[in-house]
Image (cartoon, grey):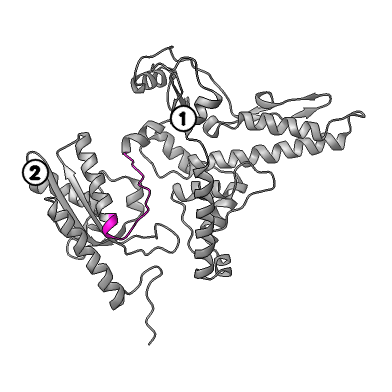
Amino acid sequence: MKWVLPEYIEDILPAEAARIEGLRRKILDLFFSKKYELVMPPLLEYVDSLLTGTGHDLELRTFKVVDQLSGRMMGVRADITPQVARIDAHLLNRRGVTRLCYCGSVLHTRPLAPGATREPIQIGAEMYGEAGVAADVEMLELLCSALELAGVRKARIDIGHVAVFRAIAHEAGWRWCIPLQHRVGNGLVYCSRFMSDQQATEKLLSEVRGKTLIQPRVIKFRAGRRDKAWNKNVVALGLASGFLEPLESTSIHLIMTGTTRLMRLFPFNGITQSFVDQYNEEVLRELEAIRDFLVLHYHAVERDDSPFCRHCRRMFIPASLARRIEMFQKGAHAWQYEGELFRVDSWTQVMLGQGITPERYHHYAKAMSDQDLTRFLSALKGSIEQAVLQMPSHQDFLDRYCKASNTGAS
């Protein structure tokens, strides 16, 4: 009989098992030395307690089974962190600071990344009862020490918090906060079907930090384009030709490409319909590709905590975008059209960032051996590092080319 394991599930053989166990002991000993206490939550819990307050993303990653004793729905944990939080809040319920650590297997319905296992080992530490900067620093230092024990010499740590996400994507749209040299620009984009002008204004003002320099102005827009960017002897450029949702700030780019296109097809000897048709076809192709990229941000969202988010998840999407999503899901295939603004890396990052994970890797990856791929990526990394070393810092660039006359904080 041939034994076959489920996809992305594997046996760990002696040498690798010994390495993992040694690393587990080192990291737990590190946690113990910092006064963190070990807890061991169960592998299975009832879904109503396992997923309480965790969000839709974790629910999608959780295997669910029916308990034959009680008939209730149970879940196999996909993340230990919420379980540890439950232990702190409902079982320990201590006053002051509590430091807990854990290590165990979790199970995912789908791999988090191409080629990743669906049964990873999760190890971590949590601090409760302290919300100050000192607690953040302690956790970051602990993380760095654990990475060093694991032999990770170069790492990039992404620091995030749910409040950061809420400040970007809200219940009816999104908002921006852009630091400039002498002020901070703030704005809020919202769908009027799900939020009134007054609600949007109040929300924006409540989230602005520091002194408000001007009162918010409501600017209404309807996303769309003209039927013909070039009609007879009139050519519409920039915002005159159409308006796309400003999530990707494409207006200046469209002015530049429209101007370049007009120069290439300019009717020096009088208007020829074939030139007009070519111009309009290129404009349409460009706008529709940008439209699909913008719609992807809204449609491939896992939030369902507001009518707007639920609407975006269920809304009709263009066939061209549906094809892109399916090809990425089925075969890890991403592409760009000639002259397309958003390149392969942009499409890939948004797909993965929005939780669209390929079911299998692209077989083009077999064209290079592991050794050749390692050498190629190492050389690429080295060339990038050398290029970055020669570049000025962000502040140096601003000071040299566009330093503001007034840099006072406001």
User: Of the residues shown, which amino acid type is indicated by label 1?
Assistant: Gln
Residue 147 coordinates in the image, percent (x, y): 29, 55
Q: Judge by depth and name the residue closer to the eye, 14 or 227.
A: 14
Q: Is residue 293 above or below residue 147?
A: above
Q: Is residue 331 visible?
A: yes
For disc 1, the neighbor class at 10 Å (few under 14, some 14 to 19, many from 20) is few
Q: Residue at x 48, y 28 (%)?
A: 191
Confirm or deny contact between disc 2 and disc 1 (CB under 8 A). Answer: no
Q: Residue furthest bottom?
A: 1
Q: Is residue 48 visible?
A: no
Which quarter of the image is occupied by the C terminus?
top left
Residue 137 in the figure: left or right of residue 62 = left
Q: Residue at x 75, y 33 (%)?
A: 260
Say whether residue 210 is magenta: no
Q: Residue at x 24, y 40 (%)?
A: 137
For disc 2, the marked residue is 93
Q: Residue at x 32, y 51 (%)?
A: 59
Q: Main secondary structure of the magenta part?
A: loop
For disc 1, the marked residue is 395
Tell me the tag on residue 139.
none
Q: Which residues are magenta?
A: 147-161
Q: Residue furthest front?
A: 390
For disc 2, the neighbor class at 10 Å (few under 14, some 14 to 19, many from 20) is few
Residue 73 coordinates in the image, percent (x, y): 25, 57
Q: Residue furthest top?
A: 214
Residue 30 in the figure: left or right of residue 338 = left
Which badge, 2 or 1, comes first in the chain's sequence? 2
